[in-house]
């Protein structure tokens, strides 16, 4: 009995020591965890917007898009018996991408041809009988119309047969396969997604001040961020006639891709105006930018707090971004330390 009591006491002591150790570890872990204190001031660096001169190469930011990107669909219904491409394949315009089972249509075409042959012979005989006035003109006309109707039906069947071959409407790359071999498809069922990046569209947002510098057909020079200063030639394909709420106009350019350094759809790029003049205007450091070029924001220090503030951006030269509206020359804009900030965080300016 005493032995059982001793074992129980030892077990209780061990459990107590384990519990104490766990609480000790928990306390140590909690001391190492960073807990955001909304009242604590975060040290940041800031500066006011300045007057900056954007020199000859005024550039406008945008994102490259594929010139053509569509789902190639079937015009006919049937079972998919051939699928000749896979994702990543380069195809040419008119190339057969897939085929549907067309055996029944071919049999119908053979039957239609036999019917036409029979009607042709009958029509010849009826024409002779009509000349000999053995039959009436109405009977002869009915036979002639029956022959023409059969010929139309044959053309319809031949078109259906042609539709069982799904062809590439333009040259490009297969970016998605949307059906599997053996699938039953209907008219309008997408078979593959085909993307053409031999030329690309680069849409930029241009302030009202600069929109008249762009004309449809005008030659432009574009860059892709990934390729640095390498230039790609293009032209303006569309100038919007309606501004957005910030008085910016959408300008669409068509850019010729390069075989050596190929631009991919979705990459960031910019359009530069050839022979553009320099512009002196209010600007902020690119380091202050929060978010994307499409929705630019900065932290403005007001009464000891960092207030997330949207603004309208104009041109950029890589180091500075033009301020079209939303900020003034007296605003104090955070340029370092934004990663630790939230809207209305308390801040302390570094001296």
Image (tube, rainbow, N blue to C red):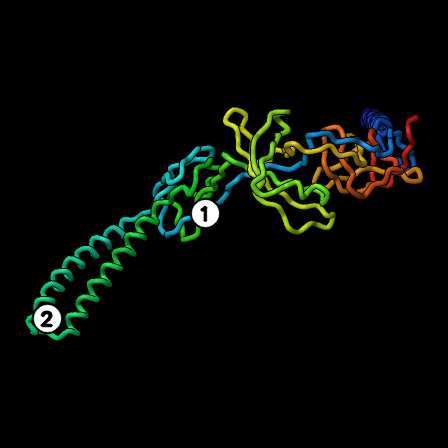
Image quadrant of residue 304?
A: top right
Residue 42's tag is none
**Is residue 269 or residue 118 the one in the foreground?**
269
The answer, for residue 1, to whether it is visible in the render is no
Check the image and report above or below for 145 versus 22. below
- Which type of secondary structure does the marked residue at label 2 adopt? helix
Q: CA distance from mark 2 to mark 1?
A: 53 Å
- Which type of secondary structure does the marked residue at label 1 adopt? strand
Check the image and report above or below for 157 versus 64. below
For discs 2 and 1, the disc positioned in front in the rendered view: 2
**Is residue 328 or residue 296 the one in the foreground?**
328
Image quadrant of residue 21?
A: top right
The answer, for residue 197, to whether it is visible in the render is yes
Which quadrant does the N terminus fall into? top right
Residue 190's tag is 1
Decide if residue 94 is on the left or right side of residue 29: left
Crowdedness near tag 2: few (<14), some (14–19) or many (≥20) residues, C-alpha within 10 Å: some
**Is residue 137 or residue 42 the one in the foreground?**
137
**Is residue 248 or residue 227 the one in the foreground?**
248
In percent of width and height, residue 98 lies at: 37, 42
In percent of width and height, residue 192 lies at: 45, 42
Residue shown at the point (47%, 33%) measured from the top left = 88
In percent of width and height, residue 35 lies at: 85, 33
Check the image and report above or below for 75 versus 316. below
Residue 130's tag is 2
Residue shown at the point (37%, 38%) measured from the top left = 95
Residue shown at the point (75%, 28%) measured from the top left = 319
């Amino acid at each position: 009995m005493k032995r059982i009591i001793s074992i129980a006491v030892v077990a209780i002591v061990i459990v107590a020591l384990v519990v104490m150790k766990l609480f000790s570890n928990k306390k140590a872990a909690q001391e190492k965890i960073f807990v955001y204190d909304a009242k604590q001031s975060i040290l940041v660096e800031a500066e006011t917007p300045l007057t900056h001169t954007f020199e000859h190469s005024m550039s406008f930011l945008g994102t490259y898009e594929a010139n053509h990107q569509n789902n190639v669909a079937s015009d006919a219904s049937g079972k998919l018996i051939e699928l000749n491409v896979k994702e990543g394949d380069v195809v040419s315009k008119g190339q057969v991408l897939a085929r549907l089972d067309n055996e029944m249509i071919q049999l119908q075409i053979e039957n239609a041809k036999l019917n036409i042959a029979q009607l042709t012979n009958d029509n010849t005989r009826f024409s002779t009988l009509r000349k000999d006035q053995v039959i009436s003109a109405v009977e002869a006309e009915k036979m002639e119309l029956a022959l023409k109707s059969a010929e139309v039906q044959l053309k319809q069947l031949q078109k259906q047969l042609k539709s069982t071959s799904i062809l590439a409407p333009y040259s490009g790359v297969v970016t998605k396969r949307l059906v599997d071999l053996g699938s039953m498809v209907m008219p309008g069922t997408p078979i593959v997604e085909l993307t053409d990046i031999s030329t690309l569209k680069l849409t930029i947002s241009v302030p009202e001040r600069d929109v008249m510098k762009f004309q449809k057909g005008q030659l432009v020079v574009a860059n892709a961020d990934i390729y640095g200063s390498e230039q790609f030639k293009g032209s303006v394909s569309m100038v919007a006639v309606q501004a957005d709420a910030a008085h910016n106009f959408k300008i669409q350019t068509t850019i010729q891709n390069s075989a050596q350094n190929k631009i991919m759809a979705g990459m960031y790029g910019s359009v530069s105006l050839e022979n553009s003049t320099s512009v002196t205007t209010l600007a902020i450091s690119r380091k202050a930018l929060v978010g994307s070029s499409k929705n630019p924001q900065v932290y403005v220090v007001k009464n000891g707090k960092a207030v997330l503030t949207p603004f309208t951006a104009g041109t950029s030269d890589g180091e500075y971004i033009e301020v079209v509206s939303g900020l003034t020359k007296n605003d104090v804009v955070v340029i370092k330390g934004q990663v630790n900030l939230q809207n209305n965080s308390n801040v302390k300016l570094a001296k």
